[in-house]
Image: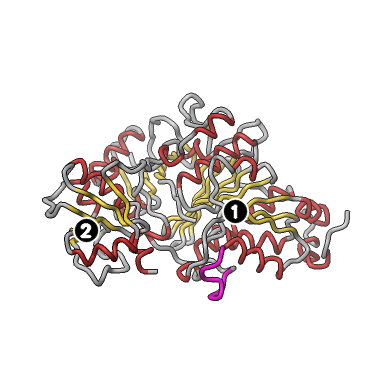
Amino acid sequence: MNIEVLLFGRLAELLGSERLHLEAVADTDAVCSQLEGLCPALKQLNYQIAVNHMIIHDNQWLTDGMTVALMPPFSGG
Amino acid sequence: MNIKGEARYQRQMLLKDFGRTGQEKLFQAKVLVIGAGGLGCPVLQYLAAAGIGTLGIVDHDVVELSNLHRQILYSVANVGSLKVNCAAERLREFNPDITILTYPVQLNNQNALSILSEFDIVIDGSDNFPTRYMINDACVLLNKPLVYGALSETEGQVSVFNVADESGIKVNYRDVFPAAPQPGEVLNCSEAGVLGVLPGIIGMMQANEAIKLISGTGETLYNQLMIYNLYTSQTYKIKLSPGDPNLTDLPSDIPSFMKMDYNWFCGIRTLNRELKEMGPDEFHQVLQEDSFTIIDVREPGELPAASGFEYISLPLSELKREIPLIKGDKVILFCHSGIRSIVAGELLLEAYPEKEFYSLKGGILRMKS
């Protein structure tokens, strides 16, 4: 199983990359906990998740080849 | 219908699906632009050029020299003057056939509804979360389309909220970001920096969304969030959907909107009785006393560097992990703009309730100017 993870804004900065590949992640909660393992600071941050370009509001099951995007809110103007 | 100064718009009226009808719609439209900064300047300039009949501008700030690399409506001579006045003057010179209305006020939930209700479309070019949530809620309550744009260093977000799709589904900012970030979690342009072209690009995308919405041409970004990356020139679009209506903090009616504390919602707490704010003048006075410990809570390498007094560097990120030993009974904390020093002050107060903590109001930014 291969899940592509796209990171935006500060999340990309914290994880040192805009794109990661994860294996063995059954759902979006597992993606978040794996990323939090790589970078504990993530636990303190607010972000929204999209799966295959669709926003999700609850944990979602993942299948091979899906793309998970993590987007923080921006305030600047 | 007579369009004042019609010849000016000839090139866009030539576009088949826009035509004279599209131009008439723009001329009849009333658009409110909140914030005349990095996003607001290109939005205003292009909407004035396109012939939006009435443009409102809300901003309570004055022009600063550090604005000029991205806020292209202003000149060096404008430094120190109210942005709304400078912007209106410039836009009237540029297009005398449209009406410009100015609101030199800080938009809040007490004045927002009366200002917003005068307009058909609202454009968010603000620079902080409490204002963004407040504008969103006001637009939901007044049922106004909201063209959203926001920046972070090298990325921008654009969307159109409160516009229903074919099945009547519409989303708002709270469907995308239901929980507000805490102070210091997301840095704004004055803290993290921004290349001048980024607000230019995102602001022009917002102007484009407004023109499409009004003229009925093309497809707007309703129920979608677009993210643009300045460094890779890539855009990424996400389809939005409403969140659980039982879980939203959206005020249900106007009285609850008026009572809402947007600063509190965004984690900006009124100062503790013990944590005081100190202005730059008082700061310069107490420097002579030599009885204060001064702490920079910015991250390593942040500019401008402090000079002319002794201080300790204790980045907020480290303070959040571990509170170190702090010497002295009276401590002044400073950061870039005076927000993170409040967060640091509250952390330190918990650890050292016997000490006096002060947060430098406006940060090093205010002190330098």
- Of residues B90 and B302, which is closer to you in this image? B90
Q: Does the magenta run of residues contain B81? A: yes
- Residue B206: name its quadrant: bottom right
- Judge from the rendering whether residue B174 lies leftward or rightward of residue B272; answer left or right: right
Q: How many marks?
A: 2
Quadrant for residue B270, please give it: top left
Q: Earlier in the sequence, mark 2 or mark 1?
A: 1
Residue at 38% in and 38% down: A64
User: Which element carries disc 2, helix, strand or loop?
Assistant: strand
Q: Taking B312 as reference, is A3 above or below it?
A: above
Q: Residue at x 56, y 56 (%)?
A: B59
Q: Chain of mark 2?
A: B
Image quarter (top left, top right, bottom left or bottom right) of the C terminus of chain B: bottom left
Residue B305 in picture, x, y percent from top left: 28, 69
- Report x, y in % for residue B324: 13, 50
Q: Nearer the viewer, residue A29 or B28?
A: B28
The answer to whether residue B268 is left or right of residue B295 is: right
Residue B57, above or below B71:
above
- Check disc 2 and report the residue beneath it: B295
Secondary structure of the residue carrying tag 1 is: strand
Residue depicted at 53% across the width and 44% down the height: B108
Percent x, y of residue B152: 43, 55
Q: Residue furthest right?
A: B1
Which chain letter matches label 1? Answer: B
Q: Which residue is mark 1?
A: B58
Q: Over which residues does the magenta segment extend?
A: B74-82
**How far apart are labels 2 and 1 at the CA level?**
36 Å
- Tell me if mark 2 has few (under 14), some (14-19) or many (20+) residues whose alpha carbon lies within 10 angstroms of its own: many
